[in-house]
Amino acid sequence: MSIYDYEVKKSDGSTVSLKEYQGKVLLIVNTATGCGFTPQYEGLQKLYDKYRDQGFEILDFPCNQFANQAPGTNDEIHEFCQLKYKTSFPLFSKIDVNGANEDPLFHFLKENSKSVLGTKIKWNFTKFLVNKEGKVIERFAPVVEPEKIDDKIAALL
């Protein structure tokens, strides 16, 4: 399996194949609107503005598994991100990233990346960098600010 074999749900409930992102560098992030790391949306948007015309996409997956820090509907989360952080990268439906109901995409990402946590995600704003061929290149802990990933994205583009 590759990342391009997965389908995910957009925030409006429609399904999209990740094949639509083939040939692009991706940063896939599980996010939350009420988290101490939520201000990272600003840095994510700056990266998106800087590199989107060069074949870079950020895929935002809200997750409410960590201390209920992503409350609200998909529409409410989308509105919050656009109003507060002016985000313009794709927002997908709220998902689980760990446990029995974990999203298959995040299972794949965790299985194909190295972490001291093994195959668990510790918190919101865990980031996965994927190259143009769909290979997971690196996993970044929530404490790693988006700006610190800039050089790695540039190298892959």
Image (cartoon, helix red, strand yellow):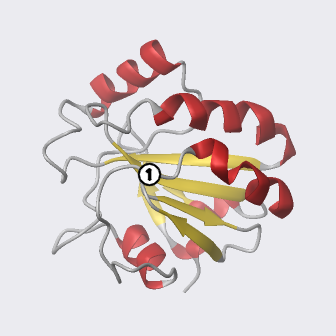
Residue 22 appears left or right of 71: right
Whether 9 is drawn above or below 47: the answer is below
Residue at image coords 76%, 39%? 52
Q: How many other residues sit within 10 Å of disc 1, few (<14), some (14-19) or many (≥20)?
A: some
Q: Which residue is mark 1?
A: 143
Amino acid at pointer 1: Val
- In the picture, the quarter occupied by the C terminus is bottom right
Q: Position of residue 83 (x, y in %)?
A: 44, 13
Quarter of the figure with residue 101: bottom left
The residue closer to the viewer here, 47 or 1, is 47
Q: Position of residue 156 (x, y in %)?
A: 81, 63
- In the picture, the quarter occupied by the N terminus is bottom right
The residue closer to the viewer here, 93 or 135, is 135
Q: Position of residue 63 (x, y in %)?
A: 28, 49
Residue 85 appears left or right of 131: left
Secondary element under disc 1, as helix, strand or loop, is loop
Residue at image coords 59%, 27%? 88
